[in-house]
Amino acid sequence: MDLASLIGIISDIGLIVSAIILGGDVPHFLNVPEIMIAMGGTMAATLSTFQFKDVFRKTLMYAPS
């Protein structure tokens, strides 16, 4: 993981926590249908871009590049 990825993850978590603390309700940020759409769309885009054997090898088998 490079520095930009780490900064992005930390800032994403910080922004979500800040929004909840500033007056949002937790259920508004944990909407199951929205999570399903986001994760499903990400998986579909990944599978339509790369071959399944490459996705399976990189994600489930943790093979090095």
Image (spheres, rainbow, N blue to C red):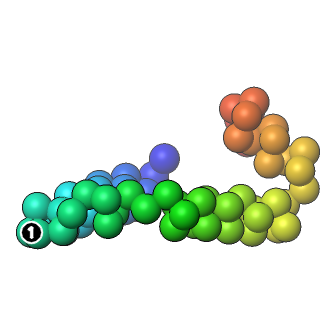
The spot of residue 24 in percent (x, y) is 18, 68
10 relative to 62 in the view: left or right: left
21 relative to 15 in the view: left or right: left
The spot of residue 2 in percent (x, y) is 45, 52
Residue drawn at x 89%, y 50% is: 52
Residue drawn at x 26%, y 63% is: 16
Q: Is residue 63 above or below residue 6?
A: above
22 or 59: nearer the viewer: 22
Q: Which residue is mark 1?
A: 22
Residue drawn at x 81%, y 41% is: 56
The spot of residue 47 in percent (x, y) is 82, 60
Q: Is residue 38 above or below residue 30?
A: below
Q: Residue furthest left?
A: 22
The spot of residue 59 in percent (x, y) is 70, 40
48 relative to 36 in the view: left or right: right
Residue type at mark 1: give it. Answer: Leu
Residue 7 appears in the rendering: no
Local SS, label 1 = loop
Residue 58 appears in the rendering: yes
